[in-house]
Image (cartoon, rainbow, N blue to C red):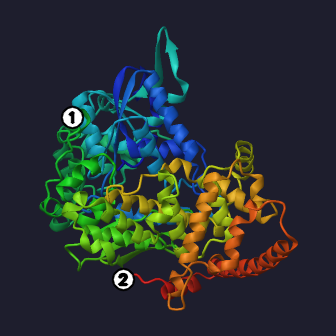
Amino acid sequence: MGVQGLASLLERHRRIYLDVEFRMNRLVVDGNNLLHLLYFNSGLDQNHGGEYAAFEDLTERFVTALRSCGVAPYVVLDGGTDTSDKKLETVTKRALEQIEKVHRAAMTGESKNIMPALAKQVFQQTLVRLEVPVAQCFAEADWEVAALATEWKCPVLSNDSDFYVFDLPAGLLPISHFHWQDVKQKGSQRYIPCKRYYASCFCIYFNIKQQLLPAFAALSGNDYVQVRGIRWTEFAPEGSETPSRLEGLLRWLRDFQQPQEALKASLGLMGEPSKNSEAEVMQKLDLGMEEYRLPASSLKRFFVDGVAPPLPAVDEALAVVPDWTRLPLTQARLTPHVLDVLLLQRIKLSIAVEHTGLPSTNRTSRPLRQVMYGLLLGGRRWLRVEERDRAGLDLTFIPVAPTFTGAVQRLGLGTLHEANPAERLQVLLEALGVTEAALSRLPPQLRLPVAVTCYWLQRAQPPPDLTELKALLVVMMDKVSPGHKAALQHQYCQQKPDVLVSQVFNQWQVCLKDSIHLNQLLDFPLPDPEVARLYQGTLVHQLVHRMRTGGRLKNFLKSRGRYNIALSVVHQFLTRRAPTSSEPRGRRPPADLTAEPQLALLYEDEETEDRSAVRMQEEMLLDNQLSVRTRYRTKDRVNRCNKPQLSRKQECRGWGIL
């Protein structure tokens, strides 16, 4: 949501704000807004796939700063998509803009505010670990944030300009003026210096009635309504060097007492619309104003007593969304994609920083999502889920069939939470193509990430090579020595990423994310992994670069225990999954990893120095063989980048959608 240009207007008129020393209070936090601003304003890497350990530390420092001042945060997160489609035009436009940003970031190495795939998981997991109260809404969070703050008479923390319109009793603390990194002390008490905004101060400053604020938001244009044909700059104060559209609108509104009066008068400024179009415009304006009428808070009881709010009062929601999902959805232990699939049969897939001449990385994890769709839509097998994704520089909407095979057929959504744990685990293992016995040798926290790695080796297109696999496992197991880690990340953080390496690791991240969502729906048959420990973008990219230019992996290792176990599990998987001639080309594991001699290279750095001459000669031959295949694969990757049409043809041959 947002009123276009309002934040900039307030920056030009800062006298509207009050300077405050914030302490000893509740604070309702717009979680999604905080997530984005914390990450994007931190200078953390965006283009190599994210710096999750550093982001975890940043989130923890934020919470610590609040608590040191006696501030109790309550974080509210967005949920599913608005079923009314009021914002569909705006959302589609932003998705296209996002694809352009992704392309520029991949080509230039610039930061374009593209959120790394797993940043939200890290944010949520950190808050839960720190015992910060968190609630996920069934739809967009703004109304719930404002309603809860109104009932508790405490401020809202957000940079969303819609909160400038809500009449909040304790006001709004804009994140851009919330100096949590500069905690001050006065006597025995600590406080956070910040600015507070009240809607009443805004109205006094611009000399309009406060009840006109929703009309101001609707007429200025927000995510729900666009008013065309009115040049508000013509009403701007005389003598303005740069006439402001919003200041002109505010000056025009001074002559009105009630919102409906102003809305009807605005029709006369739009030319001479027909009666039908006039009615349509009024309906949209009324809808735009409706967004600022607050319901009673449905989250107060959840935060106080742990009681999940009721489902939206929509017949379809009550019919298809099982009651047992309410609590895990509100606890953010279940992805809101569940609601999108059940209510809309469509989801919006996030887009990573990747070369737009290559296939979307979301294709690799589609079979995992198909299993989730099968569990959710089991009673409605004729349905398809429309996935919004990237195809080159375009936005595409792909109908995807749910999977109803294997263990999925034995489970029903209504009683999924009561199903036998062994059956739920079997669904997850079948989806990932691994066995429970192989994973049992790993620590519980690493079982899902390693299972995902095995799936990724089988499905990724283009496939990872041995260097990329080793670099990922070393970082995942947190086995890079601290000195080498700091040096490698410092050297590489400003470099433009290798788009081909990025493509490989982006696929792993989206596979992990979709596996986490499937694991959630199945009520965690495998432990939820600590995402912040699994992937550090600049580090894994630099490890690949260093190993390809002559560096030995063993020089960076601080120990080998878990790394060796993970290698062993991957070795066993690759041996068992060696392709047969009947397997579709697009579904086969990478050739130079499944060939039995190449499997030995997984252990290349674990060999002792006392190797026989025969063994050394064999390795030299294998290295030659691998280098030839790597050159062939690199050539193929470059061709796919430079010739998007070729890439799409190859996708169609190797990947079935339905």
Residue 558 drawn at (x, y percent): 71, 47
Q: Quadrant of the C terminus?
A: bottom left
Q: Is residue 628 left or right of residue 520?
A: right
At label 1, counting other C-alpha atoms closer than 10 Å, the crowd grade (few under 14, some 14-19, many 20 or more) is: few
The one of 329 and 20 positioned closer to us in this rendering: 329
Amino acid type assigned to the residue bearing label 2 in the image: Leu
Label 1: which residue?
A: 305
The one of 171 and 363 positioned closer to us in this rendering: 363
Q: Earlier in the sequence, mark 2 or mark 1?
A: 1
Numbered disc 2: secondary structure = loop
Number of the label disc, if any, that sits on residue 397 = none
Label 2: which residue?
A: 658
Residue reaching furthest to the top: 187
How many numbered marks does the figure carry?
Answer: 2
Amino acid type assigned to the residue bearing label 1 in the image: Asp
Q: Compared to 631, does 531 lie above or below? A: above
Residue placed at 38% from the left, 34% from the top? 131
Q: Is residue 218 left or right of residue 579?
A: left
At label 2, counting other C-alpha atoms closer than 10 Å, the crowd grade (few under 14, some 14-19, many 20 or more) is: few
Residue placed at 52% from the left, 45% from the top? 39
Residue 426 drawn at (x, y percent): 36, 67
Q: Quadrant of residue 182?
A: top right
The one of 561 and 543 positioned closer to us in this rendering: 561
Q: Is residue 534 left or right of residue 24?
A: right
Residue 380 drawn at (x, y percent): 20, 75
